[in-house]
């Protein structure tokens, strides 16, 4: 059963952006995949951009240098190796991802997996990285869930929220390069504030 996040009978929670056109069969296909693997807490399929030709996301990745992005974003299918078989990814893309409700309930007692500082951008990354840290897996599957008309409803505000969320993730996440974290934050601050002054 897929239902509301706070409902104790809910087995899965589907996260969807309001600018994504859903493929009707995709939810069932994602559930079927997750039913077959107890280690998987979240998944997403091959999401296309609104033009239906280029890829929006085949799952997401994060690096030790705090780069977060979608795999194969902007590429066509033949430019993206590995999309024909399921595999683990760093995070599922929140434009359309399916998460096991029990994983949220176990790790977020108030049933709210998001924090204010990542509202609108990168909250999916933080949620899934926290689940990874608890030992859950995240998978990309070959389901074609729909078309994402990215930033259609948030264009004027996307820069502000994107910068704020990325800064929060850099602040919260430690990597082997955490000793240069303050430099990263300073450089980010400078690169966005100086052009705004000009």
Image (tube, helix red, strand yellow):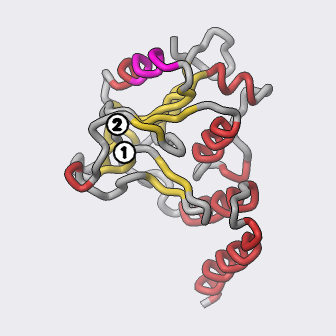
Q: Is residue 21 left or right of residue 153?
A: left
Q: Residue at x 31, y 44 (%)?
A: 82
Residue 151 image point, x, y percent: 44, 54
Determine if residue 61 is in view. yes
Please say whether residue 94 is visible from this viewpoint.
no
Q: Which mark is residue 21?
A: 2
Specify the quadrant of the image occupied by residue 25: top left
Compared with residue 110, is residue 160 higher up or lower down, i.e. above or below? below
Give the secondary structure at mark 2. Answer: strand
Q: Looking at the picture, tell me which residue is in the foreground, 134 or 13.
A: 134
Seen in the picture, residue 170 relative to 3 is either above or below; the reply is below
Q: Which residue is mark 1?
A: 148
Q: Is residue 7 left or right of residue 154?
A: right
Camera-side residue: 127 or 66?
A: 66
Q: Residue at x 70, y 34 (%)?
A: 134
| Element marked by disc 1 | strand
For the record, the magenta segment spans: 30-37
Contact flag, marks 1 and 2 (Cβ < 8 Å):
yes
Residue 144 lies, in percent from the top left, at 30, 34
- Residue 102: give x, y in percent of width and height: 65, 19
Q: Is residue 96 above or below residue 53?
A: above
Give x and y (percent) for residue 196: 61, 82
Position of the C terminus, as image quadrant, is bottom right
Above or below residue 39? Residue 94 is: below
Q: Label 1: how many residues lie within 10 Å, few (<14), some (14-19) or many (20+)? A: many
């Amino acid at each position: 059963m897929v239902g509301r996040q706070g409902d104790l009978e809910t087995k899965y929670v589907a996260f969807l952006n309001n600018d994504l056109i859903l493929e009707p069969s995709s939810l069932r296909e994602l559930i079927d995949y997750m039913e077959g693997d107890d280690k998987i807490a979240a998944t997403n399929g091959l999401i296309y951009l609104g033009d239906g030709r280029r890829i929006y996301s085949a799952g997401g990745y994060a690096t030790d240098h705090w780069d977060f992005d979608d795999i194969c974003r902007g590429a066509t299918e033949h430019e993206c190796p590995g999309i024909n078989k399921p595999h683990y990814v760093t995070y599922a893309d929140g434009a359309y991802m399916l998460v096991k409700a029990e994983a949220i309930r176990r790790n977020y007692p108030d049933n709210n997996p998001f924090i204010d500082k990542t509202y609108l951008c990168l909250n999916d990354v933080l949620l899934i990285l926290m689940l990874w840290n608890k030992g859950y897996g995240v998978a990309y599957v070959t389901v074609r869930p729909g078309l994402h008309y990215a930033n259609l409803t948030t264009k004027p505000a996307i820069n502000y929220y994107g910068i704020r969320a990325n800064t929060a993730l850099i602040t919260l996440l430690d990597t082997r390069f955490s000793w240069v974290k303050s430099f990263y934050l300073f450089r980010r601050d400078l690169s966005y504030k100086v052009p705004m002054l000009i």
